Image (cartoon, rainbow, N blue to C red):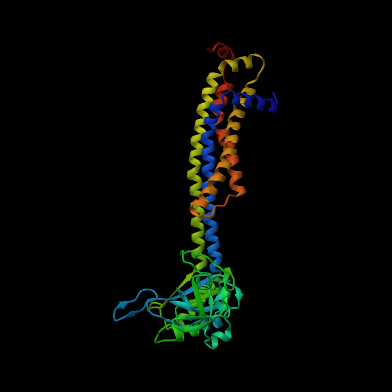
Amino acid sequence: MDLLQTLKIALRALRTNKMRSFLTMLGIIIGIAAVIAMMAVGSGASYVISQQIASIGSNIILVLPGTTTSGGLRTGSGGVQTLTSDDVRAIMTESPSVALAAGTIRTSGQVVYGNMNWSTVVMGASPELFEIREWPVVSGRLISQQDADGAAKVCLLGQTVADNLFGSVDPVGRMIRIRKIPFTVIGVLERKGQSPQGQDQDDAVFVPLRTAQRNLVKSPFPNNVGAIMVKARSEELLDKAESEIKSLLNQRHRITNSKEPDYSTRNLSEILAVAEQSSKAMSLLLGAVASISLIVGGIGIMNIMLVSVTERTREIGIRMAIGARRNDILLQFMTEAVLLTMIGGLVGICLGAVGATVVSRILSWPTLISVESITIAFFFSGAVGIFFGFYPARKAAGLNPIDALRYE
């Protein structure tokens, strides 16, 4: 018996008991739909994290003020400003593995334009920061070295600040006030979105570092910076760049083996890579949990096929009596099992795609349905049919023709 004839017989047998066939497929349908939806949610999470990683920049090391001890009391991390603009210049010029370094200092303030105002983060930054973070402007220009050297009262707006102060009006060239000090808007930065910590990176105003040190941050040490952002020349040189930075700062800050460093370094690429790996693991976990329902559906198929073998024992005996071989009977029942799971798989894929779309719209969470997940789900459903259909098919093929003909 050829495969086409076997397929026709299998389809006829499934149509004979439509309701039972549908209920048998239901477990597979639900399982495949759950796998597709869960993998889409997990892929969406991975996409969000990868976008956040891209928004930070690549090959970045963050240098932060560390702890200090005074009178037996230790301050928390960053409790004392121990980094200076001179450290930034030294890292730039004396560390061969470093491509760029930028000092930053952070404060907050009320930003006012006309009768509009907005409370936001104000960042003093070196011009190199925007190259390190790969952050261009959508209009206007970036802070120049001339602005930085002259402590010019100019600023760049993040998209969130621009939207709340100016709406649809182009802010470039207009005057705003930060803590009652007038600043000219020279550009609007491209939208970055949320950081890996969930903060809105666009809710910020950037001014030249020296301008912030002199006018906005009230510190007895106006040369201090709150952090240094460093870009290594390549991903391969990240560890070497970090080692060079530590060696240089230890020398500059007179840190000996017996003295605790007054700074700390963080390799952002490693931190964000761990976050991405965690997201991928969560995606696989969601898919694995959803796959349990496929196994349950497969057990249901095996049970129904065993019932079908019992009901059709006399039919099997007649077919064997007129010349059907055991392999023909095995192939017929295997074909029925695989058809059930494959049809259920196709329906489940459609329902999973619809479910992922609904989840995305209700929760405003991106979901990504990949061709890979659809292919895996479809062939996995076929594998379930083969695995759970083999035992009933073998039992049918192993029947004695004489006993099968006598079966009532």
Front residue of 253/367: it is: 367
Q: Is any atom of residue 98 visible in this view?
A: no
Front residue of 214/113: it is: 113
**Horizontal and vertical percent for residue 58?**
56, 68
**Horizontal and vertical percent for residue 105?**
46, 79
Q: In which quarter of the image is residue 312?
A: top right
Q: Is any atom of residue 77 visible in this view?
A: yes
Q: On the picture, is 327 further left or further right than 52? A: right
In the image, residue 41 above or below residue 198: above
Query: What is the number of callouts on the image?
Result: 0
| Residue at 63%, 27% in the rendered image | 11
In the image, residue 15 above or below residue 196: above
In the image, residue 23 above or below residue 173: above
| Residue at far top of view | 406
Q: On the picture, is 184 further left or further right than 255? A: right
| Residue at 54%, 70% in the rendered image | 167
Quadrant of the frame with the N terminus: top right
Q: Quadrant of residue 16?
A: top right
Front residue of 334/346: it is: 346
| Residue at 53%, 36% in the rendered image | 28
**Horizontal and vertical percent for residue 50?**
55, 61
| Residue at far left of view | 72
**Horizontal and vertical percent for residue 347?**
58, 38
In the image, residue 64 above or below residue 181: above
| Residue at far front of view | 115
